[in-house]
Amino acid sequence: MALEDLKRYRPAAVAAEFYQEGNETAAKGALEKLVTTLDMGKDGKVLLDVIKKSDEGDKRLANTYAQSYEEILMSATIKEMFEFYNNDFKEYLDEDSYKEAEKVFEEYGEETYKNIFSKVIGAHEILKSKRPNITEKEKEAAKSTLEKYSKLTVPLQSFEKFEMEKLSGPNEKEALKKNLTEMFKPQKKEEKK
């Protein structure tokens, strides 16, 4: 996986999401950030002018680079994702919590982002399903899957959301820090009485 490409293309993924939400102002801001991260020189200035004047061209640009971002993201291993967000983990976690996060991510290191999220999405679908033929055993397995992967999916989704927030406005840095610290609090062994 090309981590630098994931960083470079992220603003396009954010822009595409803003377009879906109908927030064109934030989308255009994210596209301006994309042009900056792609380091296009004079061509970048021309592209910025086009972005400011065109609704269809900028949506196409956002979708094209967002698709590249998605392809890179889905092929990444969990180990690569931990490396990608390593500075974020270090910033938000104390040393013991960081070691706990590292241990969790190492456990699933070679699995791909796509594989993990496919399992999680499948589990959510089972639990939300209204089909009468879903057994209690299937529901329990789905709950177990969600619990098993939550220490991977929650921080990854939180970091993605945080990056989107940074590109759009309000900074939720403290909330992210609190959530991650709570999630990766080292388990204390219970004392026997």
Image (cartoon, rainbow, N blue to C red):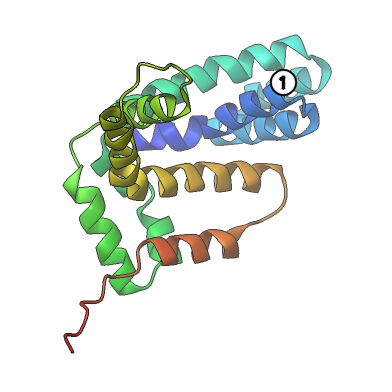
Amino acid type indicated by mark 1: Val
Asked whether residue 91 appears in the rendered view, the answer is no
Indicate whether 75 appears above or below 183. Answer: above
Name the residue located 19 percent from the left edge and 49 percent from the top edge: 106
Residue 94, image x, y percentages: 37, 73
- Position of residue 15 in the picture relative to residue 90 (left or right): right
Name the residue located 20 percent from the left edge and 42 percent from the top edge: 109
User: Where is the C terminus found, in terms of image quarters?
Assistant: bottom left
Asked whether residue 142 appears in the rendered view, the answer is yes
Name the residue located 49 percent from the left edge and 61 percent from the top edge: 179
Q: In the displayed orientation, state which residue is furthest to the bottom.
A: 193
Categorize mark 1 by other alpha carbons within 10 Å: few (<14), some (14-19), many (20+).
Answer: few
Residue under pointer 1: 46
Residue 189, image x, y percentages: 20, 77
Indicate whether 57 appears above or below 118. Answer: above
User: Where is the N terminus found, in terms of image quarters?
Assistant: top left
Q: Nearer the viewer, residue 142 or 17?
A: 142
Q: In the displayed orientation, state which residue is furthest to the right.
A: 53
Name the residue located 74 percent from the left edge and 21 percent from the top edge: 51
Indicate whether 118 appears above or below 61. Answer: below
| Element assignment for label 1 | helix
Residue 66, image x, y percentages: 53, 22
